[in-house]
Image (tube, rainbow, N blue to C red):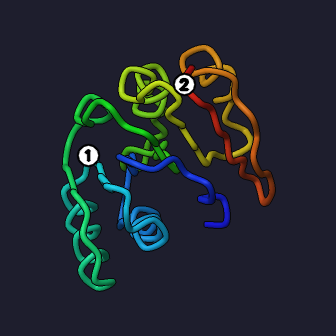
Amino acid sequence: MENIDKLPSGNLLDFGCGAGVLGAAVKRRYPHNDVIMLDVDAFATASSRLTLAANGLQAQVLTGDGIDSAPMGLNTILSNPPFHAGVHTDYMATENLLRKARQHLKSGGELRLVANNFLRYQPLIEEHVGQCEVRAQGSGFKVYSAKRS
């Protein structure tokens, strides 16, 4: 959570929102931002709505199949992306996000991603979004940040 500082103002997407903890924390910290929470799982989006309600917050919550279900013109995409589909490992949704994030971000918009150290996402981010930096690292995770040029 300490790595959600200095986010661009405007439309923010929490991709793979799960129970909505990240999206709710961002909405509380940046109440002026329009937060959109997206997950493929209807139970996850129902949980996100409950998390928002329990915290007296409002955000748009979408159930949809990956980044293709997200709106265009985003200032920020945040994600601690899923890589499990049931009991199986599946990187497809995250790799698709990284390939298409640029299309959904405004010029100067930022992708911020939390991922396990062993996942080699930095080259994909740099190829499809822009120059990527590691904002933080520890406990087996990295926080990546890239701005669309």
Give the mark toward the camera: 2 or 1: 2
Residue 9 position (above or below residue 109): below
Look at the image and tell me in which quarter the N terminus lies.
bottom right
Q: Which residue is drawn at 29% across and 49% down?
A: 38
Residue 96 position (above or below residue 43): above
- Label 1 crowd (10 A; few <14 / some 14-19 / many >=20): some
38 with respect to 117 (left or right) = left
Q: Residue at x 60, y 25 (%)?
A: 125
Tag of residue 78:
none
59 with respect to 131 (left or right) = left
Q: What element carries label 2?
A: loop
The residue type indicated by label 2 comes to: Arg
Q: How many labels does the image show?
A: 2
**Label 2 belongs to which residue?**
148
Tag of residue 40:
1
Q: Which of 138 and 130 is in front in this view?
A: 130
Could you say where residue 92 lies in the image, as x and y percent from the top left?
Answer: 43, 28
